[in-house]
Amino acid sequence: MSKKQITLRMIADHEYESVNATGNKLRIDMYDGSEKKHQSPMELLLSGLAGCSAVDAVQMMKKKRREVRDFKIEAEGTRSDGIPSFYTSIHLHFVLTSPDATQKEFEKVVKLAVDKYCSVASSLKSEIHHTAEVIRPT
């Protein structure tokens, strides 16, 4: 079984920095409007799902020896009104620019990417067991 680990630290009241095991950093903030400089945790979830799906879809298109001139995913999540305000649905809109890929094969690749190969999508579908431990430095 493979494990991933990050360390998240508070930078300011509404700003955080996440660092993975190899030192890659990601900033997170909960500001609104013009103060917003980074993605929120829920936006990062959409980014993770889109990124995971994109990598798998593009790799499959290239294995089929199709030219990928441009590729993007627009992800939109609808959240519940309560607290916690979780996603009740997520829509991924895949846009591929390719001179030699057919609509049908791209649809098949997208379905495989999201439904079978994307670890983030599978994580969202599964029951995740989590624990929490509170440590207070002395």
Image (spheres, rainbow, N blue to C red):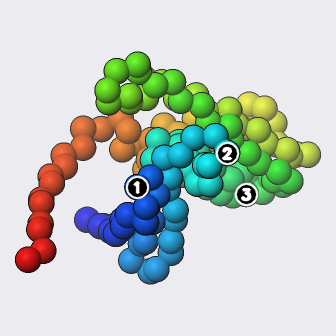
Tag 3: amino acid: Lys
- Quadrant (top left, top right, bottom left, bottom right) of the N terminus: bottom left
Residue 73 position by quadrant: top right
Query: Where does the image place residue 48, in percent across and percent down from the top left?
Result: 51, 50
Q: Nearer the viewer, residue 71 or 130?
A: 130
Q: Residue 62: which numbered mark, if any?
A: 3
Mark 2–mark 3 Cα distance, whole angstroms, equals 39 Å
Sequence-wise, the earlier of marks 2 and 1 is: 1
Query: How many C-alpha atoms fall within 10 Å of the one at disc 3: few (<14), some, or many (≥20)?
Result: few
Residue, disc 2? 34
Q: Which residue is mark 1?
A: 13
- Can the viewer see residue 72 in this picture? yes
Residue 103 location in percent, x, y? 78, 32
Q: Amino acid at mark 2?
A: Ser
Name the residue rendered at 38%, 28% in the picture. Answer: 85
The residue shown at (67%, 45%) is: 34
Disc 2 to disc 1, how far (Cα)?
A: 17 Å
Task: Assign a secondary structure to mark 1.
Answer: loop
Cα distance, mark 1 to mark 3? 44 Å
**For residue 8, above or below residue 47:** below
> As drawn, is 113 to the left or to the right of 71?
left
Residue 42 rendering spot, x and y as whole percentages = 47, 41
Name the amino acid, label 1. Asp
